[in-house]
Image (cartoon, helix red, strand yellow):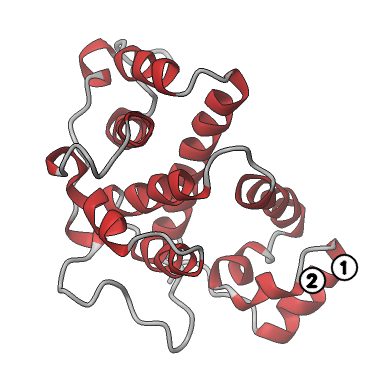
Amino acid sequence: MTVSPLDRDSARKAAEALGVPEGMTRLSVFQVLLRHPALAKPFNDLLMCLLFSGSLDVRLRELVIMRMGWVTGSVYEWTQHWGIAQVLGIDPDDLLAVRDWHSAPASQFTPVDRAALAAVDDVASCGYISPTTWVAVEEALPDRADQVELAMLVSTYAAVSVFLRSLEVPLEEGVEPWPPDGLDPGRATPPESPAAAVAPNPPTDL
């Protein structure tokens, strides 16, 4: 483990001083983040906005996060949001289907779902949402605020996954990786994306 989590009592004290909800200190990711209080508070605020004040449908939001956890190999992200999605009453079959959403029946995912999942795949494979995918996003999700929120949601959870995997943030004590069918995000490989075909050459003078 690169950075060990704070113990629960230390995390509570740090969270209280910042105005971070006490409940967040149960999570390993915040026990790590609270080692840098100046980052923990704005990160918490961003997540609270995306998770509780956003305009996107909660099912769409969780499909996006679960797909990001799967394609980036983040067992923590995948496992945590399986639990969250269950509390929200999202169909487990839909959550499982994000693992291979291209092959899912047309009736399982709406055009909005498919545009959002394609956006996840783009970002996971080459770091941005491709023009081709963005056309699909605009057609399926015409509200500009919703488009901005989707792009921020995808980008944020890509960053969260990088953070979780880089620092080897562990699942909380007693939490088992999900799902129990032997397939886990660690076996996933980033999907190919149309964005790769139009990505500019990286700069060589940095």
Disc 2, disc 1: CB below 8 Å?
yes
In this view, the residue farthest toward the front is 107
Disc 1 crowd, CA 10 A, few/some/many (<14, 14-19, 20+): few
Residue 17 circle label: 1
The residue depicted at 37 percent of the width and 61 percent of the height is: 78
In this view, the residue farthest toward the left is 103
Find the distance from the CA under tag 2 to the CA under tag 1. 5 Å
Locate residue 181 relative to residue 8 in the image: left or right: left
Relative to 71, is 17 above or below? below
Query: What residue is shown with label 2?
Result: 14
Viewer-proximal residue among 31 and 103? 103
Front-most of 20 and 134? 134
Q: Amino acid at mark 1?
A: Ala
Q: Residues within 10 Å of mark 2 (few under 14, many from 20)?
A: many
Residue 27 at what x, y percent from top left? 58, 73
Locate residue 176, reporting x and y percent.
Answer: 35, 82
> 106 above or below 196?
below
Of 101 and 78, nearer the camera is 101
Horizontal and vertical percent position of residue 202:
33, 16
Which of the 4 image quarters holds residue 191? top left
The residue depicted at 26 percent of the width and 11 percent of the height is 198
